[in-house]
């Protein structure tokens, strides 16, 4: 079992208004993370090597995988989705392109898995 990182009293200033300690105590800073992101399998082209099936989910909440709600994780798919996920879990202007993103496909061009993107507003 790993030991959790401890909060130290050392401060490293990235800017005059943000210190490492203040970031540890409030990692969101002034960025509101308002959405839970659910990526649900809606189709497979070929045979997925890790066995995704329609209905399987990857669930991301506040920069973390929600392992209780996630069925399985393909590192190649997750790696391909990271640029989208960072935009999907944040509040964005209504006209932002990320709000029109309905599906993502894993990067395996022979056995592609298609995921529906669902953004659930946090309360």
Image (cartoon, grey):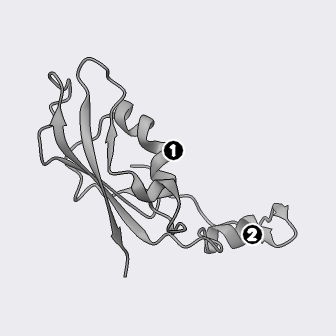
Q: Which residue is mark 1?
A: 83
| Residue at 43 percent of width and 59 percent of height | 99
Task: Point out the residue furthest to the top here.
Answer: 110
Marks 2/1: CA–CA distance: 32 Å
Mark closest to the chain's N terminus, 2 or 1: 2
Query: Dot 1 lies on which element?
Result: helix
Q: How many marks?
A: 2
Disc 2 element: loop
Q: Are marks 2 and 1 in contact (CB under 8 Å)?
A: no
Extreme residue toward the front, this view = 95
Q: Quadrant of residue 120?
A: bottom left
Callout 1: few (<14), some (14-19), or many (20+) C-alpha neighbours within 10 Å? Answer: few
**Residue at mark 2:** 9
Q: Is residue 112 visible?
A: yes
Nearest the eye: 84 or 99: 99
**Picture coordinates of residue 32 (x, y %)?**
55, 73
Residue furthest to the left in view is 54
Residue 95 to residue 100: above or below: below
For image coordinates 67% across by 68% down, the residue present is: 23
Q: Position of residue 123 (x, y in %)?
A: 37, 82
**Looking at the image, which residue sits at the far right?**
16
Q: Residue at x 26, y 44 (%)?
A: 115
For residue 3, say whether it is visible.
Answer: no
- In the image, residue 56 above or below residue 36: above
Which corner quadrant of the image does residue 79 belong to?
top left
Identify the residue at horizontal 65%, vertical 72% (top origin).
Answer: 29
Quarter residue 109 falls in: top left
Give how far across and how far down residue 86 sits, in percent: 51, 53
User: Closer to us: mark 2 or mark 1?
Assistant: 1
Please tell me the numbered disc located at residue 91: none
């Amino acid at each position: 079992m790993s030991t959790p990182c401890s909060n130290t009293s050392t401060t490293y200033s990235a800017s005059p208004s943000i210190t490492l300690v203040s970031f540890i105590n409030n990692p969101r800073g002034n960025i509101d993370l308002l959405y839970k992101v659910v990526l649900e399998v809606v189709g497979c082209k070929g045979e997925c090597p890790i066995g995704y099936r329609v209905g399987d989910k990857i669930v991301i909440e506040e920069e973390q995988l929600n392992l209780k709600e996630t069925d399985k994780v393909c590192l190649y798919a997750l790696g391909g989705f990271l640029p989208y996920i960072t935009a999907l879990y944040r509040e964005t202007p209504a006209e932002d392109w990320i709000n029109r993103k309905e599906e993502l496909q894993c990067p395996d061009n022979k056995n592609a898995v298609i995921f529906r993107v669902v953004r659930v507003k946090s309360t």
